[in-house]
Amino acid sequence: DVKVTQSSRYLVKRTGEKVFLECVQDMDHENMFWYRQDPGLGLRLIYFSYDVKMKEKGDIPEGYSVSREKKERFSLILESASTNQTSMYLCASSPTLDRGLYEQYFGPGTRLTVT
Amino acid sequence: SQQGEEDPQALSIQEGENATMNCSYKTSINNLQWYRQNSGRGLVHLILIRSNEREKHSGRLRVTLDTSKKSSSLLITASRAADTASYFCATLGSGSRLTFGEGTQLTVNP
């Protein structure tokens, strides 16, 4: 089974702190994604990556950056955390189109609270 | 932008009844997928239907797709309390990005 793990289930940070959220997948998937999920807004894509060292902005990249130095690991960085970044953060991975149909595999989520 | 829109937003039924959720979308798609999310957890892929398919079954799940109406439905038959969760549709257009709807919260009462 595909396994996607996230470094923390719950995280509390202070305004202005630099925050790192880590995601690791064990299925050699090329594609990895970071979403945030808020009540009434569904899942919104922050950033995604097609390959190592490649990244693409999603719908709401402002205030975030990402890093993908290794194929299995995709990090989301909040450069200076703000209270409006309090949310559930979900990481996902998927294989390329010729090996799958972009079915995504999700981690358990990190609930981040910024105070 | 949220392409998929689920209807209803919330659904409450009794165990053993069928649950139907609908999804509408706006642009052309390669496939449409349904996911389930238990409270406070990540999403789990349930079923995928390609744009050239009209109906697909998986266990107690039945998905239909009407590309002319840009809509899909998910039917869960003989529901169980364990089916209580949020259900999301997601559409794949060009590229590898999925666009998710806001979800339907299903409650199955024992």
Image (cartoon, coloured by chain):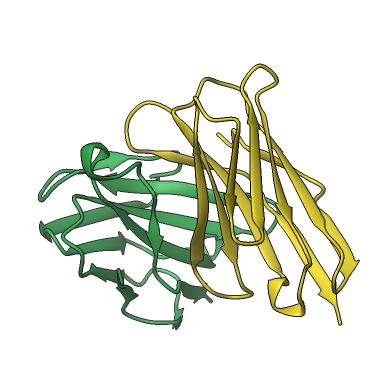
Chain colours: A green, B yellow
Q: Position of residue A82 (x, y in %)?
A: 47, 63
Q: Residue at x 33, y 37 (%)?
A: B96
Task: Quadrant for residue A2, please give it.
Answer: bottom left
Above-or-below relation of B22 to A65:
above
**Considering depth in this image, is A83 or A28 the residue closer to the camera?**
A28
Q: Residue at x 36, y 63 (%)?
A: A80
* Position of the N terminus of chain B by quadrant: top right
**Considering depth in this image, is A14 or A40 the residue closer to the camera?**
A40
Q: Position of residue B70 (x, y in %)?
A: 65, 24
Does residue B108 appear to the left or right of A24 in the view shown? Answer: right
Q: Residue at x 64, y 56 (%)?
A: B61
Does residue B69 appear to the left or right of B67 in the view shown? Answer: right
Q: Position of residue B93 (x, y in %)?
A: 43, 28
Above-or-below relation of A9 to A60:
below
* Position of the C terminus of chain B by quadrant: bottom right
Does residue B10 appear to the left or right of B95 in the view shown? Answer: right
